[in-house]
């Protein structure tokens, strides 16, 4: 359905051209001019540059950060559009402030998801003359997104064109980083909670019900989950660049539903990955875990598209290619042999089994200890000014006890140091947001050495961080004031409203079939009553030693996709309301009890200051969700059984209150 220019290289990993190898340093304006020249040579009037790699990952390896290279904006979500005389960036409310700071001169910020902001496809349809061509790299655009763009553009007489060579790579040239591969390693069944054989059988049942006998697995965390392996090709996400194809014989089993492999069929599993990443021991462990239910074969990463063409030519082949996979993968499978819909893997992965839930809880307890130790260190040292009587080990480069506050980068390093002391810690789950004062308003702020702020006792300090542990993934936010007597009435009032929103989420009881989209408004209600809101979702799914952001579940009124999947037992979500005060003063409740307030503006349930039972607060839990019947409908209750008791008295240890006592854990 998409007009093509040239032919794709086999596989999703783009190859560098001679021009790229001969690139040299230049100013951003020169790079933009060079890009426009290449666009003209390719006969396209606009070029769309998404954040994605060939697997549509949220976080990508540096060699795929094309949008950041061309625009200067480094946030994890956003799409750039370049025309002959315009350069625009669409991103959502999490990144408005960051984008304003980072965008190169000559770029326009388009505040996505606001009523007054025109979507990308509509803007192109309106601003390009009839007969124009819009270029995309088919490897970096999801099929579902490309179809939507094509539909809107065609109505305006504009074509969507797939380019063989990504012109950004040509401009980037020799400056483009090389992919730094890391070895894959086994994530054993004792941590994964079940075998590869069990997962293949679950997936097979869903694939057959969709009328297919083969499945393409494109998302990196899905491949890792399927084979019970992890990797290190992308910072913060324990995954390897790889694909998988599961295939069941067309004539196997009884009652095969018109050519689909029956329930007794043995799956042929192909793992497309650089063979140098997979040791014989790892491959043997994967095959042993697959047992008699699947044969696991290693294939070169670049061989996928050619293999899909061969597989599609077989009689009776019906290949499920996820609608969220790249346009390039969809073009590799003829329409007659293709089933295009959502893959069953994301939902199966989201429904944590008992072993994964147990691991998540244990990981959160250890992570809580690290964060509490960090907060205690801030308290003991007055933000790093005083010598530490407890003698906590300091990371290299962090000066403490010299009569000055540590800066944002140093504070993050101290927290990381405490996490490294914990068993099973593998690294951060995302780049720590260590933000003092106004920087805390930048939702995904990134402190930099030499230009970041120092902490002080004059404003708020926010730390949003998380850890990857061998048995779980964490995501925690805390905001404190280093002088408990200085939080303003506005700050305290905002915190109270956030606390009410947090409790509303942690204690909500809802019937089966309710979605996160529906619950989001329930959580925001205490903030809306005070004229407050926040420009991000209330919560996102969290993986089990996988991506810190996991779908399909979520809680967000700005993402209609979170209304497509009901919350189910076993899903893990964050609970993170916030407060964005406007220029108008925040209304203060007449009954405001300041004695129990801390200076916390944003809170996660995956929190250091919650009891171990609260370590993973979920709106739907697999391990201990209580069930009751009401009007013939089952209700799913949050596991936050003690939320009301703990939240009512929760406060930062940096803000002591006469109403409550606090004892630091040893």
Image (cartoon, helix red, strand yellow):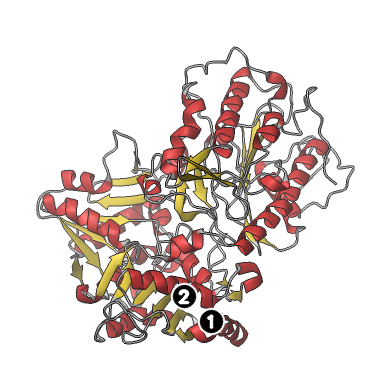
In the image, taking residue 259 as reference, residue 438 lies left or right, namely: right
Residue at the extreme top of the image, as rendered: 590
Residue 495 is drawn in which quadrant?
Answer: top right
Q: Is residue 14 visible?
A: no
1 or 2: tag closer to the N-terminus? 2
- Residue located beneath label 2 in the image: 201
Asked if 294 appears above or below 143 in the picture, the reply is below
- Residue located beneath label 1 in the image: 290
Residue 156, percent from left and from top = 12, 49
Residue at x 41% of width, y 42% of height: 517
Kindly state the secondary structure of the residue where label 1 is placed. Answer: helix
Residue 364, percent from left and from top = 68, 52
Residue 237, percent from left and from top = 55, 62
Residue 521 is drawn in which quadrant?
Answer: top left
In the image, taking residue 249 as reference, residue 526 lies left or right, namely: right
In the image, taking residue 455 as reference, residue 561 lies left or right, namely: left
Asked whether the beta carbons under mark 1 and mark 2 sit within 8 Å of each other, the answer is no
């Amino acid at each position: 359905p998409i007009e093509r220019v040239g032919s794709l290289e086999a596989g999703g990993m783009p190859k560098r051209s001679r021009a790229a190898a001969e690139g040299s340093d230049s100013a951003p304006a020169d790079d933009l001019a060079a890009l426009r020249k290449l666009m003209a040579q390719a006969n396209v009037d606009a070029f769309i540059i998404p954040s994605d790699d060939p697997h549509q990952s949220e976080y990508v390896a540096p060699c795929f950060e094309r949008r950041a290279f061309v625009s200067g904006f480094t946030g994890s979500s956003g799409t750039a559009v370049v025309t002959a005389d315009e350069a625009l960036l669409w991103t959502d409310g999490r990144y408005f402030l960051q984008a304003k700071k980072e965008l190169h001169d000559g770029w326009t910020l388009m505040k996505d998801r606001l009523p007054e902001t025109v979507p990308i496809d509509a803007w192109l349809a309106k601003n390009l003359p009839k007969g124009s061509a819009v270029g995309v790299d088919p490897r970096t655009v999801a099929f579902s997104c490309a179809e939507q763009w094509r539909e809107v553009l065609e109505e305006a007489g504009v074509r969507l064109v797939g380019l063989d060579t990504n012109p950004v790579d040509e401009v980037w040239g020799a400056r483009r980083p090389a992919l730094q591969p890391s070895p894959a390693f086994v994530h054993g069944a004792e941590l994964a909670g079940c075998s590869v054989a069990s997962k293949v059988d679950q997936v097979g049942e869903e694939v057959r019900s969709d009328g297919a006998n083969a499945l393409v697995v494109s998302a990196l965390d899905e491949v890792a989950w399927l084979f019970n392996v992890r990797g290190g090709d992308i910072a913060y996400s324990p995954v390897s660049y790889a694909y998988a194809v599961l295939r069941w014989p067309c004539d196997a089993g009884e009652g095969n539903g018109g050519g689909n492999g029956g329930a007794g069929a043995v799956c042929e599993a192909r793992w497309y990955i650089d063979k140098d990443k997979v040791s014989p021991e790892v491959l043997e462990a994967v095959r042993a875990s697959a047992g008699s239910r699947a044969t696991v074969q290693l294939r070169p990463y670049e061989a996928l598209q050619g293999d899909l063409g061969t597989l599609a030519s077989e009689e009776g082949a019906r290949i499920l290619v996820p609608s969220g996979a790249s346009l390039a993968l969809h073009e590799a499978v003829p329409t007659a042999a293709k089933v295009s819909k959502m893959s069953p893997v994301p939902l199966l992965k989201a429904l944590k089994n008992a072993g994964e839930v147990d691991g998540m809880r244990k990981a959160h307890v250890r992570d809580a200890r690290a964060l509490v130790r960090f907060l205690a260190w801030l308290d003991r040292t007055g933000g790093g000014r005083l010598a530490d009587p407890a003698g906590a080990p300091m990371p290299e480069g962090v000066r403490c006890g010299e009569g000055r506050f540590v800066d944002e980068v140093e504070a993050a390093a101290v927290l990381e140091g405490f996490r490294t002391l914990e068993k099973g810690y593998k690294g951060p789950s995302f780049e720590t947001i260590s933000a003092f004062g106004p920087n805390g308003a930048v939702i995904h702020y990134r402190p930099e050495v030499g230009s970041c702020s120092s902490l002080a006792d004059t404003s708020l300090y926010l730390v949003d961080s998380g850890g990857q542990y061998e048995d779980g993934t964490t995501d925690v936010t805390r905001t404190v004031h280093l002088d408990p007597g200085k939080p303003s009435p506005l700050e305290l009032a905002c915190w109270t409203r956030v606390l009410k929103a947090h409790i509303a989420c942690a204690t909500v009881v809802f019937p089966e079939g309710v979605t996160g989209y529906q619950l989001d408004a329930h959580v925001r209600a205490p903030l809306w009553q005070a004229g407050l809101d926040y420009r991000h979702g209330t919560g996102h799914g969290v993986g089990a030693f996988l991506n810190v952001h996991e779908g399909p579940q979520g809680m967000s009124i700005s993402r209609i996709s979170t209304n497509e999947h009901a919350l189910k037992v076993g899903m893990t979500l964050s609970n993170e309301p916030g407060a964005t005060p406007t220029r108008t003063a925040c209304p203060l409740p007449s009954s405001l009890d300041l004695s129990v307030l801390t200076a916390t503006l944003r809170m996660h349930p995956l929190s250091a200051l919650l009891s171990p039972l609260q370590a993973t607060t979920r709106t739907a839990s697999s391990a201990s969700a209580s069930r009751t019947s009401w009007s013939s409908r089952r209700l799913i209750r949050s596991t936050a059984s003690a939320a009301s008791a703990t939240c009512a008295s929760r406060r930062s240890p940096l803000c002591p209150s006469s109403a409550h006592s606090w004892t630091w854990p040893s």
